[in-house]
Image (tube, grey):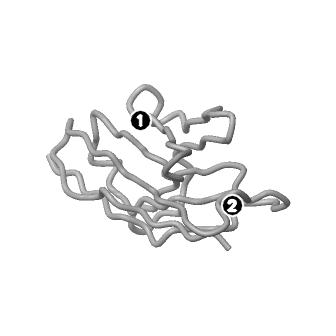
Amino acid sequence: QVKLQESGGGHVQTGGSLRLSCAASGRTFTMYAMAWFRQAPVKEREFVAQINLSDVTVYADSVKGRFTISRDSAKDTMYLQMNSLKAVNAAVYYCAAFLYGDSTWSTWGQGTQVSVSS
């Protein structure tokens, strides 16, 4: 079993930056990839970015050039550096893990709130 715990959310003004962290614990050797998703009020959860064990990254078009996903394998921690934040980026951000043998993102954290005001 893998457990994920997000941190780093908060409130920033438009144009500001935040760095989110997702610490994994448990059977972390079963993880193939990790990702960030977000869900804004009355909207569906959407993909933000992912990174796999080879550090191959994928980003949603809406965050390319502003957000950077990274990981520290020694700490089993994934990060999301968010720059030039916009009001539309406000949401609860979730980290997720894709485990070997799974067909979808099966493991989720509880989320961390990001608020952006003008």
Q: Residue at 43% x, 67% y: name it.
A: 111
Amino acid tagged 1:
Phe
Q: Residue at 56% x, 45% y: name it.
A: 73
- Give the residue furthest to the top: 65
The residue beneath circle 2 is 105
Q: Is residue 70 positioned above or below 64 on the image?
A: below
- In this rendering, the count of numbered labels is 2
Asked whether 84 or 6 is in front, the reply is 6
Asked whether 90 or 105 is in front, the reply is 105
Q: Residue at 19% x, 56% y: name it.
A: 11
The residue beneath circle 1 is 67
Q: Position of residue 19 (x, y in %)?
A: 32, 45
Q: Is residue 23 positioned above or below 89 on the image?
A: below
Amino acid tagged 2:
Trp
Report the side of 94 relative to 17 (left or right). Answer: right
Sequence-first tag of 2 and 1: 1
